[in-house]
Image (cartoon, rainbow, N blue to C red):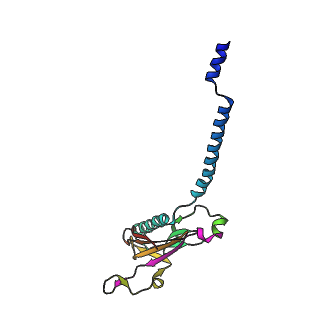
Amino acid sequence: MNKVHEAYRNRAFSLIEVLLVLALVAVLVGIVAGNAGAFIKGSNFEPPDRVLKKAVLDAVYHASESKRAAYLSYFDENATFLVTNSFGEILSEHRVYKKLDKDFKEDESLLPKVTFLAIGPLAGDDGGNSIYDDQDLALKRVFFHSGCSVPFSVVIDFRDKKQVMDFDPFSGYVLKSRER
């Protein structure tokens, strides 16, 4: 019988080893569960510059497809880029947040501030200055017609970062992106 007893001793796990493995598994489950909550909360959000790029391409598409004017605007209250037609009908909408809670609406730093600016004609000795100020070039919405738009740039102020993006009026792609 001693031989059988020694065989069990060599093959079986002790109680301490089992408890250590269970404790490690519990710690890993706690880490994963904590990160899962943050992952779910983060999946509600898409960066505003990426959403803007999609909205601009949508506006170019709608204007070229229908051969009618399309307008791109930004709705502050729910952080949404809207593409509308001349009658005000919404052709497409692109949200920064899929679902807005009270916390987002109360904390203004969580909602991006978007400003559309027309790019003025360049003049001067070196050909790189505009006679217009930014306040003169501010747009409420960007006009797209027959698949192109006025030359424009967008300033996105979000989470203490200002990003300026210049768009190509014909393709809708970003020509230049910089932080202020």
Q: Nearer the viewer, residue 169 or 101?
A: 101
Nearest to the observer: residue 8 or residue 171: 8
Horizontal and vertical percent for residue 61? 42, 66
Please indicate whether residue 178 sits to the left or right of residue 6 in the image. Answer: left
Please identify the quarter of the rendering in which residue 105 is found.
Answer: bottom right
- Indicate the position of residue 31 as horizontal and vertical percent values: 62, 48
Is 33 rendered above or below residue 60?
A: above
Q: Is residue 46 visible?
A: yes
Q: Is residue 121 left or right of residue 82?
A: left
Residues 48 and 162: in front is: 162
Q: Is 15 contained in the magenta span?
A: no
Residue drawn at the location 60% of the way across and 55% of the way down: 38
Total numbered labels placed on residues in the image: 0
Relative to 142, 41 lies left or right: right
Q: Residue at x 34, y 81 (%)?
A: 128
- Which of the two residues, 150 or 14, is positioned nearer the viewer here? 14
Q: Is residue 109 within the magenta segment?
A: yes
**Is 48 rendered above or below residue 140?**
above
Task: Evaluate whether residue 72 shows in this view.
Answer: no
In the image, the segment drawn in magenta is 106-123
On-image quarter of the N terminus: top right
Name the residue located 45 percent from the left edge and 78 percent from the top edge.
117
Percent x, y of residue 42? 57, 57
Residue at the image point whose x is 44% and y is 85% from the top:
133
| Residue 175 x, y percent position in the rendering | 38, 69
Question: Which quadrant of the structure image shows residue 149?
Answer: bottom left
